């Protein structure tokens, strides 16, 4: 079942496929936690279905093979680190032959922005001259790390984020606990990220974070202590801190110049936090040290 926030897009793609107007290479772009992988699998499964309906039938041989995870014409590439040239060449070899079930052939490349340059170059010819009834579905958080030659040969789909209403309705079926409104504000457009935050064991609530931050402001909690608590999840602290700063700006708390300067510091830190070898404890200590300066 397609996620509700993708339903309209899915129906558009399905309609274009039935009309013979679907591009052979789709690049699905959207942030982490939106469900791109599931969408790509859903579209791929639809293209393989042996009945041309508005959604895949779930009953034909192709659908049964997809559900069993062994459809011979569905190929997927995914890597926790980088997608190498051998992965791409192996997939291209499988696509070069005839469809074993007589229908479409589908290649899904998850996190295509993790392809090495040689892997991306190996994919180019297939993107330019695909074999008959071949479809390639690529997903990526953004197009920045993809080669221009890859982007130019794909139809780019900027995936819609979920509305807060869609997220709330979907989460009601996935999670039974309370959801802080601040978390819905932060992660409402990426429901899978919000669900992961809610389901984490010993996950910290935004209210607890705000209380700790207030103690840092008052000099009751050492900056280093809070930084140590968050050094394993610095990205979340920086996201939550940005939301806290926005709220402080709206409420007219503290000097606005200081709030704006600290917000810019958070944005810069968010870009740096994924750099390998970065001293995260030092980075967070610096950011949280700026919090205390708001009192001066």
Image (cartoon, rainbow, N blue to C red):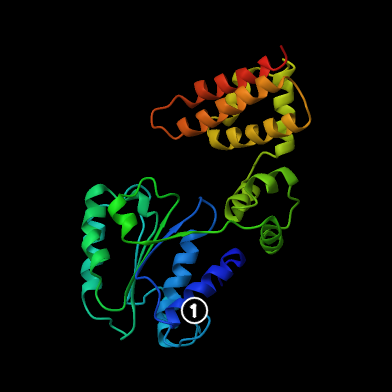
Q: Is residue 174 visible from the viewing direction of this image? A: yes
Q: Is residue 26 above or below residue 274?
A: below
Q: Residue at x 36, y 45 (%)?
A: 145
Quarter of the C terminus within the rendering: top right
Q: Is residue 83 visible from the viewing direction of this image? A: no
Q: Residue at x 69, y 55 (%)?
A: 164
Q: Residue furthest top?
A: 296
Residue at numbered disc 1:
15
Q: Position of residue 188 (x, y in %)?
A: 65, 51
Tell me the crowding category of disc 1: few under 14, some 14 to 19, or many 20 or more residues within 10 angstroms, Cα based.
Answer: some
Q: Residue at x 53, y 82 (%)?
A: 54
State the SS at label 1.
helix
Q: Is residue 258 above or below residue 129?
A: above
Q: Position of residue 39 (x, y in %)?
A: 49, 65
Q: Position of residue 262 (x, y in %)?
A: 61, 24
Q: Nearer the viewer, residue 147 or 140?
A: 147
Q: Position of residue 183 (x, y in %)?
A: 68, 45
């Amino acid at each position: 079942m397609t996620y509700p926030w993708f339903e309209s897009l899915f129906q558009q793609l399905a309609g274009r496929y039935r009309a013979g107007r679907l591009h052979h290479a789709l690049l699905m772009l959207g942030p982490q936690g939106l469900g791109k992988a599931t969408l790509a699998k859903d579209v791929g499964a639809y293209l393989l279905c042996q009945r041309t309906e508005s959604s895949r039938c779930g009953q034909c041989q192709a659908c049964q093979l997809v559900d069993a995870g062994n459809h011979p014409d569905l190929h997927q590439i995914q890597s926790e680190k980088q997608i190498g040239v051998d992965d791409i060449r192996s997939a291209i070899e499988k696509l070069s032959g005839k469809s074993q079930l007589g229908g479409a052939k589908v290649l899904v490349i998850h996190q295509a922005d993790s392809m090495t340059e040689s892997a991306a170059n190996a994919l180019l010819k297939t993107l330019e001259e695909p074999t008959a009834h071949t479809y390639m579905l690529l997903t990526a958080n953004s197009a920045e790390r993809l080669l221009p030659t890859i982007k130019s040969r794909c139809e780019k789909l900027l995936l819609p984020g979920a509305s807060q209403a869609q997220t709330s309705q979907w989460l009601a079926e996935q999670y039974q606990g309370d959801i802080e409104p601040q978390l819905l504000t932060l992660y409402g457009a990426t429901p899978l990220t919000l669900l992961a935050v809610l389901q984490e064991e010993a996950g910290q609530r935004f209210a607890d974070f705000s209380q700790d931050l207030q103690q840092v402001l008052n000099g009751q909690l050492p900056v280093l202590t809070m930084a140590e608590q968050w050094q394993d999840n610095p990205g979340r602290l920086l996201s939550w801190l940005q939301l806290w700063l926005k709220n402080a700006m709206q409420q007219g708390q503290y000097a606005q110049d200081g709030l704006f300067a600290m917000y810019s510091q958070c944005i810069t830190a968010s870009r740096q936090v994924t750099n390998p070898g970065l001293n995260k404890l030092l980075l967070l200590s610096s950011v949280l040290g700026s919090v205390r300066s708001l009192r001066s």
